[in-house]
Amino acid sequence: AAAVLLAACGSGQVGQSGSNGSAPPPNKNLVLIPGVQAEPFYISMQCGAQAEAQKLGYTLDTSAPQKFDAALQTEKVNALGSNPPAALLIAPTDDTAMLAPIQQVANRGTKIVQVDTSLKDSSLAVSSISSDNTQGGQLGADTLAQLVGDRPGSVLVLDTIAGTSTTAARAAGFTEQLKKYPNLKALEVQFTQNEPEQAAAKVTAALAATPDLIGIFATNLNTGEGAATGLRNAGKIGQVNLIGFDASPAEVTGLRNGEYQALIAQDPAEIGKQGVDQAVAALEGKPVTPKITAGLHSITKSDLDASSQYFYKQSC
Ligand code: T6T
């Protein structure tokens, strides 16, 4: 009977009083729902979030969809069910489709924090933390322009899935900034569904159709890894400049061996840490910062060895 009583006390929910009339323990559970499982960007974010949660006396569970797909992410959000966490840190994979499911969780009293990607209507989030993705695109264009100098040519931009706030901003920032370099002409942005195979195929097609292809801007690690495969298959490594986004182990190796000429690295661990800080501030009635921008770093082969703090992790 004692065991049963303990179990009943332990499952006390926010707002209910304990069985002996005392206040229930505060809900200190946080959940992180990233864009996709087993990907170094989100793993690094999770590491930063987990360490911070532990430091502040909270638990953090991660529930990641198998693919970067709004329907699969909606299932994860809906699975929070009737016992939602105190706060949800989420990277919405679609800036519109994820609004309704997240709204339902917010309606049950959970604080919402956006990490990395965001909804078009961010008003239900107490805080949103991301890189300045437009600036990341601009940095990509400036880096490419520096690498090619006066040489003229066309440039391919590989985006992921329409509705992904981050990569859309990177593609737009890159394309706009490239206009400052009249020798470089951006081709129409290509979507890859965030699949490396599709990115490789787009590169193969662009190489065939565009003899003066001088550069590729890949807006995230999957498009970059696919683009590198496309260039490798065509024997064009090093002849076409590949500017990647992110700093996954595969991308860092690619930069070292000449497949990439530059990477724009984000700081996903910092995004995760700040996400927890803002969630906890909201839960504890402390001042919350609605919008936080994490740092970006352009890495080329010459500064690779001095840049290891920006490399993403495969595990914590
Ligand atoms: O680039 C990151 C993230 O910022 C973006 O929103 C989606 O793709 C990544 O997870 C890398 O694959």
Image (tube, grey):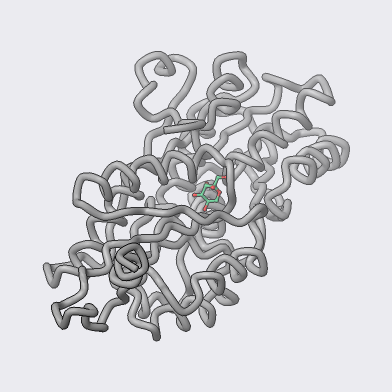
Q: Find residue 101 and report its horizontal and vertical position in percent.
A: 53, 78
Q: Quadrant of the C terminus?
A: top left
Q: Find residue 310 and report its horizontal and vertical position in percent.
A: 38, 30
Q: Find residue 268 and report its horizontal and vertical position in percent.
A: 40, 43
**Horizontally, is 312 left or right of 234 in the view?**
left
Which residue is nearer to you in this view: 54 or 119? 54
Q: Is residue 230 visible?
A: yes
Q: Residue drawn at (74%, 43%), measured in percent from left and top?
A: 199
**Horizontally, is 265 left or right of 278 in the view?**
right
Which residue is nearer to you in this view: 83 or 35? 83
Q: Is residue 127 visible?
A: no
Q: Residue drawn at (29%, 48%), measured in percent from left and top?
A: 273
229 versus 287 height, above or below: above
Q: Find residue 26 and report its horizontal and vertical position in percent.
A: 21, 69
Q: Residue drawn at (39%, 85%), measured in percent from left and top?
A: 107
12 versus 166 height, above or below: below
Q: Quadrant of the N terminus?
A: bottom left
14 versus 56 height, above or below: below
Q: Residue drawn at (61%, 41%), measured in percent from left and top?
A: 218
